[in-house]
Image: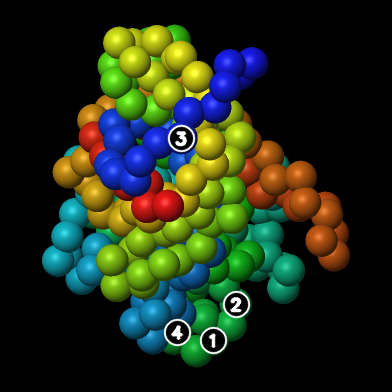
Amino acid sequence: MARPARVLPPGAYRAYLAPAALAEILGVIAWQGLGLRALRTRQTPLLRLADGEVALDPGIELIEHGAGGQAPRFSPQGFPLPERLTLVQAGQFGQCLVDARSSREYGVPVNAAAERPASLEMAPGALDIADAAAVVGDGLLVSDLWYGNLSDRARCAVTGMTRYACLRVENGRAVAPVEPMRFDVSLYDLLGAGLLGLTRERELLTDTSTYEQRSTTTALLPGILVRDLPLTL
């Protein structure tokens, strides 16, 4: 980190994304992508996945693990919530999150306090997190991402900034920090054909926000190795 920062040309770089970086991307998608209302109104950025037009890597499994997080096991209206919901299984769209409003509107039982995950988990893989730089070879180590937003709903694409602790990797070794750059990537590429592996270790990430009230949201995620992380500016 003490070395002069590198300025990289725009392009696609092989990269390891730490759990916190993955959480930023999934958080943008999950905020409006996994609820029943978004699916029924065709507003979800995961529409092509839900319609079966595309699939993620077969190793991708996302669950809402109510029994494994710290959020209450009941909704604000008092509905009991299930221990586990499978949101994505073997790369295919699974169950939707249904809050009390959508339950009343669409006649489906309540299974969530809100239509976004409160206790998201992703299944692990086989990579060793200690070997992240070695398996990248030539590319980037990305510890975190910032200011994520949807850039293209149809492509399920997220844009944001690399900012801090993004390191250039050469010959399997981190050699220098990288000047902040903008990324723009489709989840269908990141967790689809472009996914090279998931770490066996997972990190429990807790939301520390206190807007209106203290957050109880958590995410248990692995790191991911991807073929291409597009950096645009």
Residue 178 in the image: state x and y as whole percent. 50, 31
Would you call the spot at circle 3 few (<14 residues within 10 Å), some (14-19), or many (20 or more)? few
107 to 1, vertically: above or below: below
**Is 198 situated left or right of 70 in this image?**
left
Instruction: Give me the residue at 77% from left, 51% from top.
Output: 209
Amino acid type shown at disc 4: Gly
Sequence-wise, the earlier of marks 2 and 4 is: 2
Residue 100 in the image: state x and y as whole percent. 60, 77
Instruction: Give me the residue at 22% from left, 46% from top.
Output: 192
Residue at the spot of label 3: 7
Sequence-wise, the earlier of marks 1 and 3 is: 3
Q: CA distance from mark 2 to mark 3?
A: 49 Å
Would you call the spot at circle 1 few (<14 residues within 10 Å), some (14-19), or many (20 or more)? few
Residue 163's image quarter? Answer: top right
Q: CA distance from mark 1 to mark 3?
A: 53 Å
Would you call the spot at circle 2 few (<14 residues within 10 Å), some (14-19), or many (20 or more)? many
Query: Mark 2 and 1 residues: CB-CB less than 8 Å, in contact?
Result: yes
Residue at the spot of label 1: 104
Query: Mark 2 and 3 residues: CB-CB less than 8 Å, in contact?
Result: no
Amino acid type shown at disc 3: Val
Q: CA distance from mark 4 to mark 1?
A: 5 Å
Amino acid type shown at disc 1: Arg
Nearer the observer, disc 4 or disc 3? 3
Name the colour scheme: rainbow
* Disc 3 secondary structure class: loop
* Disc 4 secondary structure class: loop
Sequence-wise, the earlier of marks 4 and 3 is: 3
Residue at the spot of label 2: 100
Sequence-wise, the earlier of marks 2 and 3 is: 3
Residue at the spot of label 4: 107
Query: Mark 4 and 1 residues: CB-CB less than 8 Å, in contact?
Result: yes
